[in-house]
Amino acid sequence: MAYNPSDLDMFATNFSTGLVGKRPKLVSIDEGIVQTQYTGLGYNAECNLDLEYAMTLVTASQEVTLYQTGDMVQGASFGNFLDALDGTFCAFDGGDDPTFDAPYPDTSPGGYDGKDCGTVTPANVISTSYSYNEADLSPAYAIRQCTEYAKLGLMGVTFLFSSGDYGVAGSNGYCLNAGGTESPSGTIFNPSFPSTCPYVTSVGATQMSPGASVTNPEIACTEPVVSGGGFSNYFAIPDYQTDAVTAYFQNYSPPYANNTWNSTGTSRGYPDLSANGFNYVIAVDGSFQGVSGTSASTPVVGAILTMINDARLANGKSTIGFVNPTIYSVNFASAFNDITNGTNPGCGTDGFKATVGWDPVTGLGTPNFPSLLEKWLALP
């Protein structure tokens, strides 16, 4: 995956003329490059989408950084990225999993003969539009990465991950079978990682009701993508989320058998919040196209939080870092537009229901930027 420079300029010419010719700051990890050999929707759409909107929305004082990870032979995954951010993660406590993380040094012809460990300083806000199904990973592997996100969050880094586009199902609509395998015909809900990690912020998607005005309330995104959400099978509910999840089950009792999903009420729920994920215009392969997904809503939330960081730094304050305990607090409830209509179908069900307060469809709702900015500027 890579962005196409000419597409960025095409988008900027139409929507943000001051960005024509501008490029994100490239940080190469394990010899990652912006490849231009292969172009088109499948190669450029994801990266183009993220950069076109992030670069347009953020203030100029905080440039957008692109972490391009992995050489052209092996590629890379989350473990390789975290290796570069923290040398201790790279060197201790289990190492990467070669099933998912590319082995470096890469001894293949043309491969990168090094390994980037602790070579990169993380940005203040990191938005990622990729994920695994939680069930694809061992608990130990997922927990190790989740702990690293907690560590970096305490250092002032905000991690955002898209909640997925298939409702309660996993990637490409795959659900779990009774034996733990995955298939399109499975009937057991299949949560998404890293969204299930309690130390990242998971972003779902909303849309306008068909034919509605922009002044009307949003609904959960259900067409052509479905806002991902549900409950982890690996991670316990964090303290900051206990009241919200308890209130959800008091308002709504999901009508599904207990063996269909983690119905204990004691597991991490996601997403944490949402933003519009429907019908974004992007420039890709030399033309304008409409796309939808939590891959669109996530970088928009990233831009919002980056602008809040910019304002706090200008006032001599720290970055906001791990935001979940703050946004779940009573003081911040009024800074979100509560989404109370819609579901996130999948696995042969209607999925969960959006209700008053937090729900595993749209989280706390969509952010009201002026209110969030005011509240965060009032904090130390």
Image (cartoon, rainbow, N blue to C red):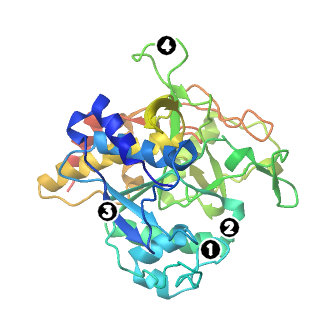
User: Which amino acid type is marked by label 4?
Assistant: Ala
Q: Residue at x 32, y 40 (%)?
A: 9
Camera-side residue: 315 or 92? 92
x%, y% of residue 106?
Answer: 55, 82
Measure the alpha-carbon separation of dots 1 and 4. 44 Å
Measure the alpha-carbon separation of dots 2 and 1. 6 Å
Measure the alpha-carbon separation of dots 3 and 2. 26 Å
The 10 Å Cα crowd at callout 3, few under 14, some 14 to 19, many 20 or more, is some
User: Which amino acid type is marked by label 1?
Assistant: Tyr
Q: Mark yes or no: residue 330 visible.
A: no
User: Which amino acid type is marked by label 3?
Assistant: Ala
Q: Are marks 1 and 3 in contact (CB under 8 Å)?
A: no
| In this view, the mark in front (4 or 3) | 3
Say whether disc 1 or disc 4 marks the residue closer to the N-terminus: 1
Q: Secondary structure at mark 1?
A: helix
Q: Kindly identify which residue carries mark 3.
A: 123
The 10 Å Cα crowd at callout 2, few under 14, some 14 to 19, many 20 or more, is some
| In this view, the mark in front (1 or 3) | 3
x%, y% of residue 244?
Answer: 52, 45
87, above or below 137, in the image: below
Quadrant where the C terminus sits is bottom left
Would you identify the image quadrant in which residue 57 lies? top left
Left or right, residue 206 beside residue 251:
left
Q: Kindly identify which residue carries mark 1.
A: 141
Measure the alpha-carbon separation of dots 4 and 3. 38 Å
Q: Are marks 2 and 1 in contact (CB under 8 Å)?
A: yes
Q: Residue at x 55, y 42 (%)?
A: 41
Q: Kindly identify which residue carries mark 4.
A: 212
The 10 Å Cα crowd at callout 4, few under 14, some 14 to 19, many 20 or more, is few
User: Which amino acid type is marked by label 2?
Assistant: Leu
Say whether disc 4 or disc 2 marks the residue closer to the N-terminus: 2
Q: Mark yes or no: residue 211 visible.
A: yes
